[in-house]
Image (tube, rainbow, N blue to C red):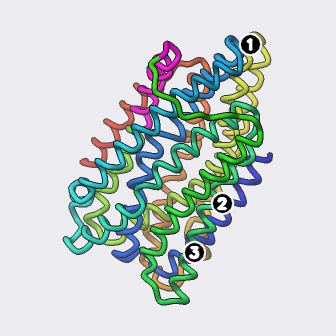
Amino acid sequence: SIMSLLTFVSRVLGYVRDLIFAFALGATPGADSFLLAFRMPNFFRRLFAEGAINNSLVPLFIDIKKKQGKQYAELFIGYFFSILLLSLLFVTIICEIFMHNILSFLAPGFSENMLEKTTFLARVMFPYLIFISISSLLGGLLNANNRYALWSFTPIILNLFMVFAMMYSFVNSFITELALSWAVIISGITQFSILFLWTQKKNIRIIFIKPKLTNEIKKLFRLLLPNILSGGIVQINQFVGIIFASTISGAISWLYYADRIIQLPLGIFIISITTIMLTILSKEKVNEKNKQQKIDTSIMLVLTVTFLSVIGLLVLSDLIVDVLFKRGKFGYGDAKATSDAIVMYSIGLPAFGLIKLFSIIFFSRQNTTIPFYISFLSMILNIFLLFL
């Protein structure tokens, strides 16, 4: 309930952010440019951080803490933190250098002027990856210690900074895309600072020590690798869509707005259920009956929420887009294209919810390979259907 409430507040603020964004930029080349640039740090964040860290680290951390004590568990986190930070710095430097080449590949439909602009915005935002990935590590540790509220609150910070940036750019006639890019970086620093101070206050220590490949770290990487590859496949699926969408002006923006609507039921209910289930299933090693009851209840919750959402989205997609976005530079054609995308996304909503839940069951048993294989098959099918 706490996670869902905070996620709901975050999504409402996210809607306010998207409403202002749609009014100011609509589905113009400027909007496409910013959204693609914003995807760059978020692609690697989802690769390095969110799912991968939570799904692999939380069950292993709980297991180590139970068997070898809190002090050894903190040492284990220290080793991983050092390796993660060095990896993030390396990736950030490489991507900053080759950003133009990467974006040229991802957006073959962009003009040279649009590519230059997108490259600049992406370079401004990319260090956000470092701060948000470390924040994800801190959030995973808080979840492992049964503290879910603050990590659910942190997306609110990003939404607030982006709203203030657009208001500032409107009042001062500043370039909206540039103001948003700087807001992303500042929000990343703020999110990290708040989470770091909170973990210290709650006596959850994270230390920077010389990296060491202990048996536990090796085991973590064995769990992480399929998880990262699986997360990478999801991102590749999205980027394959962008490659096709970049050839149609406004298509990247239409898909973004549609995805934001679909993420509402996924974020408020499904992510909350699966995040808490991961911790519960990782801890309950003995009572299989109790564990099975929780899985059954979660499946019923996921199916109920997603099927109700599907009905609402299929019936009301035109009205939702009309009320939420159709104003300013976001016209009728944009609203119709976004509504069509929502209808297609909504059909897969129950499947998306169950994928999240079933994957968590495997992750809680420290099995990350089965979800990877299935994600890989999904990617091949997606690419084939797109070409078709």
Majority secondary structure of magenta residues: helix
- Cα gap from disc 2 to disc 1, whole angstroms: 37 Å
* Residue stretch in magenta: 214-231
Neighbor class of circle 1 (other Cα within 10 Å; few <14, some 14-19, many 20+) is few
Q: Which residue is mark 1?
A: 288
Q: Earlier in the sequence, mark 1 or mark 3?
A: 3
Amino acid at pointer 1 = Glu
Q: Nearer the viewer, residue 384 or 24?
A: 24
Evaluate whether residue 158 shows in this view. Answer: yes
Q: Which residue is mark 3?
A: 19
Under circle 1, the secondary element is helix
Q: Is 274 left or right of 89, judged from the image as shown?
A: right
Neighbor class of circle 2 (other Cα within 10 Å; few <14, some 14-19, many 20+) is many
What's the residue at 64%, 22% (across, down)?
A: 73
* In this view, the mark in front (3 or 2): 2
Amino acid at pointer 3 = Leu
Q: Nearer the viewer, residue 197 or 164?
A: 197
Q: Earlier in the sequence, mark 3 or mark 2?
A: 3
- Cα gap from disc 3 to disc 2, whole angstroms: 16 Å
Under circle 3, the secondary element is helix
Q: Which mark is residue 344?
A: none
Amino acid at pointer 2 = Ile
Q: Quadrant of residue 374?
A: top left
Under circle 2, the secondary element is helix
Q: Which residue is mark 2?
A: 156
Across and down, in percent, residue 249 comes to 31, 71
Across and down, in percent, residue 269 comes to 69, 46
Q: Verify whether residue 238 appears in magenta.
A: no
